[in-house]
């Protein structure tokens, strides 16, 4: 069964410190992994997708198929990074693609 | 603009009343989804649609129904609202031909009293 696990519900780091938000997944096929961010009372926004291998707002994430992980990293956290982060996996079924979300990690960057 | 709007943004309703939430898109995406967001549970799929009049259940579909009579509109109905359905509801759209993930609406905050 498809599953996305984010082990940390809450994460606090000091401004300027490195941050890593963990995401592990289980999926029988070739996964498509995403990170979404939700700032306070706003809509979820796509932050990163593994297929594009891009860096957005200083964040990067590498898909590690051996460890089935897709951790989100940033070398120097900023206050504006405080938000809720969701890891998501896209899977294909007979009727189309579905996303499976982790339970989210709330990141607080302490000034 | 993201090309997807939800209405209403906020609603308070009484237990036992029917409620309909609307999702409207201007992107002509084939797939539309309804999620609920609750603390500790993240986002859970309620129902989704893969075309006009084509819908399927998600993991938390009990007590909810959906309809999609046009590509641009996806309606979520709580047939008889209960306090456990107090939540924030998000609509999302996607185009499977693009590896762009979902685009989300701004959410509807529903309170059942």
Image (spheres, coloured by chain):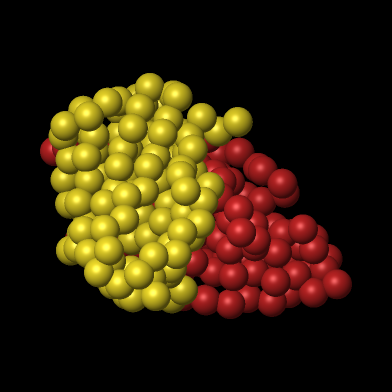
Chain colours: A red, B yellow
Residue B85 drawn at (x, y percent)? 33, 68
Q: Quadrant of the N terminus of chain A?
A: bottom left
Tell me if B8 is positioned left or right of B56 in this view: right
What residue sits 21% from the left and 58% below the top?
B79
Residue B54 drawn at (x, y percent)? 16, 34
Report if residue A99 is visible in the image: no
Report if residue B102 is visible in the image: yes
Q: A100 or B109: which is nearer to us?
A: B109
Q: A40 or B20: which is nearer to us?
A: B20
Tell me if A50 is positioned left or right of B18 in this view: right
Q: Quadrant of the C terminus of chain A?
A: bottom right
User: Where A88 falls versus A9 (above or below)?
Assistant: above
Tell me if B95 is positioned left or right of A13 in this view: left
What residue sits 45% from the left and 24% below the top?
B26
How many numbered marks does the figure carry? 0
Residue A107 drawn at (x, y percent)? 64, 69
User: Where A16 falls versus A98 (above or below)?
Assistant: below
What residue sits 58% from the left and 63% below the top?
A84
Q: A30 or B11: which is nearer to us?
A: B11
Q: B16 or A54: which is nearer to us?
A: B16
Q: Quadrant of residue B19?
A: bottom left
What residue sits 55% from the left and 33% below the top?
B2
Residue B83 drawn at (x, y percent)? 33, 75
């Amino acid at each position: 069964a498809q599953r996305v696990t984010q082990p940390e519900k809450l994460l606090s780091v000091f401004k300027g410190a490195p941050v890593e938000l963990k995401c592990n997944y289980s999926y029988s096929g070739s996964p498509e992994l995403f990170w979404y961010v939700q700032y306070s009372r706003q809509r979820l926004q796509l932050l990163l997708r593994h297929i594009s291998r891009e860096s957005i707002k200083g964040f990067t994430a590498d898909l590690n198929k051996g460890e089935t992980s897709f951790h989100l990293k940033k070398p120097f956290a900023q206050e504006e990074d405080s938000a809720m982060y969701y890891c998501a996996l896209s899977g294909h079924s007979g009727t189309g693609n579905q996303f499976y979300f982790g339970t989210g990690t709330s990141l607080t960057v302490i000034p | 603009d993201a090309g997807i709007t939800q209405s209403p943004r906020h609603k308070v309703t009484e237990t036992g009343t029917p409620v309909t939430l609307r999702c409207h898109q201007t992107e002509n995406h084939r797939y539309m989804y309804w999620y609920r967001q609750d603390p500790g549970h993240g986002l859970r799929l309620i129902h989704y649609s893969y075309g006009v009049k084509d819908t399927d259940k998600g993991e938390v579909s009990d007590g909810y129904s959906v309809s999609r009579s046009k590509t641009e509109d996806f309606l979520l109905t709580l047939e008889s609202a209960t306090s456990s359905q107090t939540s924030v509801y998000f609509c999302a759209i996607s185009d499977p031909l693009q590896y762009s993930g979902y685009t989300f609406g701004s959410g509807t905050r529903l309170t059942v009293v």
